[in-house]
């Protein structure tokens, strides 16, 4: 079950990162290289924090929300920096250099994945090096597969990949911002004691429902009247 959870987490993070890489101006060789760097980063986090996983857990617990907010703002900002695709492809352009930050997976997401991999080590009865290296290879391959698959689908649709880059960054930033605001509250609510809703009076319940229906119908008919008046 734990292994499945780690694989799902790696898949989710690789899909987000791979789609951005797949719509970027990078060549296939560059996509493989960048994905390999992400795998190495995951392996490095596992090796560094394996002896001190409590420190990693505290960092994630304290700063994940703030980190998600900052990552979302960064993605939205980068996505709104114009739609001139030729500028993105010119080496040495300041915007192009800044947009390399969009390729990076959320550091706290990567840290959470590293923490999950560290928790796998005693379950698999293997060394940290073997488990970390295996997880890094799987993560890198998933990112490559998603990126190249996205590039292929975009090509079949006869779009230039870079054309979708800005829009995708804005979408990813908006989703990250929404999830960072909603998911922590949802998780917190799951830990709170819940009591079933009780209806004190069926008469009051019927009155509330009837009032709601009347308001909906009144709004609908008013809308129809406005259309006919135009």
Image (cartoon, rainbow, N blue to C red):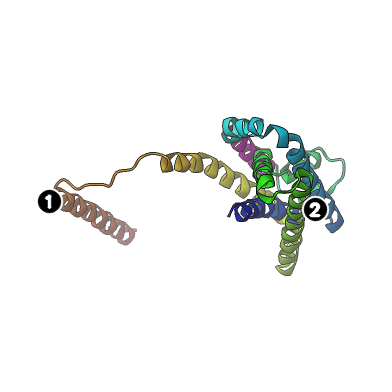
Which sits in the foreground, 94 or 103? 103
Question: Percent position (x, y) of residue 11?
Answer: 66, 55
Q: Would you say 147 lies left or right of 196 here?
A: right
Q: Would you say 216 lies left or right of 100 here?
A: left
Q: Secondary structure at mark 1?
A: helix
Question: Percent position (x, y) of residue 223?
Answer: 31, 56
Q: Residue visible at 58% across and 44% down?
A: 176
Occupied quadrant, residue 216: bottom left
Q: Residue visible at 69% across and 32% down?
A: 52
Question: Percent position (x, y) of residue 117?
Answer: 68, 46
Occupied quadrant, residue 104: top right
Occupied quadrant, residue 70: top right
Q: Earlier in the sequence, mark 1 or mark 2?
A: 2
Tell me the distance, in whole angstroms, between the alpha carbons under discs 1 and 2.
64 Å
Evaluate if marks 1 and 2 touch, with contact meaning CB atoms under 8 Å apart: no
Which label was assigned to residue 25?
2
Q: Secondary structure at mark 2?
A: loop
Query: What is the crowding at mark 2: few (fewer than 14 residues within 10 Å), some, or many (at least 20)?
Result: many
Query: Is 118 within the magenta?
Result: no
Please identify the quadrant where the N terminus is shown: bottom right
Specify start and end residues of the magenta stretch as a single range: 66-79
Please identify the quadrant where the C terminus is shown: bottom left
Question: Percent position (x, y) of residue 71?
Answer: 64, 38
Query: Is 78 within the magenta?
Result: yes
Please give the count of numbered marks on the rendered protein: 2
In this view, which residue lies farthest toward the bottom? 156
Which label was assigned to residue 66?
none
What residue is disc 1 on?
203
């Amino acid at each position: 079950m734990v292994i499945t959870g780690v694989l799902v987490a790696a898949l989710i993070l690789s899909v987000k990162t791979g789609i951005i890489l797949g719509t970027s101006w990078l060549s296939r060789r560059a996509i493989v290289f960048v994905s390999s760097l992400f795998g190495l980063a995951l392996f490095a986090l596992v090796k560094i924090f394996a002896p001190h996983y409590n420190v990693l857990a505290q960092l994630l617990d304290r700063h994940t929300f703030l980190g998600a907010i900052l990552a979302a703002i960064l993605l939205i900002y980068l996505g709104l920096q114009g739609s001139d695709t030729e500028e993105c492809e010119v080496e040495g352009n300041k915007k192009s250099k800044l947009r390399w930050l969009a390729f990076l997976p959320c550091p706290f997401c990567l840290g959470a994945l590293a923490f999950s991999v560290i928790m796998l080590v005693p379950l698999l009865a293997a060394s940290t090096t073997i488990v970390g290296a295996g997880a890094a290879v799987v993560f890198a391959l998933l990112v490559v597969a998603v990126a190249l698959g996205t590039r292929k689908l975009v090509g079949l649709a006869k779009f230039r990949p870079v054309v979708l880059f800005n829009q995708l960054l804005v979408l990813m930033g908006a989703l990250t911002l929404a999830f960072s605001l909603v998911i922590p509250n949802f998780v917190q609510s799951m830990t709170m004691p819940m009591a079933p809703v009780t209806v004190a009076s069926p008469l009051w319940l019927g009155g509330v429902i009837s009032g709601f229906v009347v308001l909906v119908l009144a709004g609908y008919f008013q809308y129809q009247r406005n259309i006919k008046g135009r």
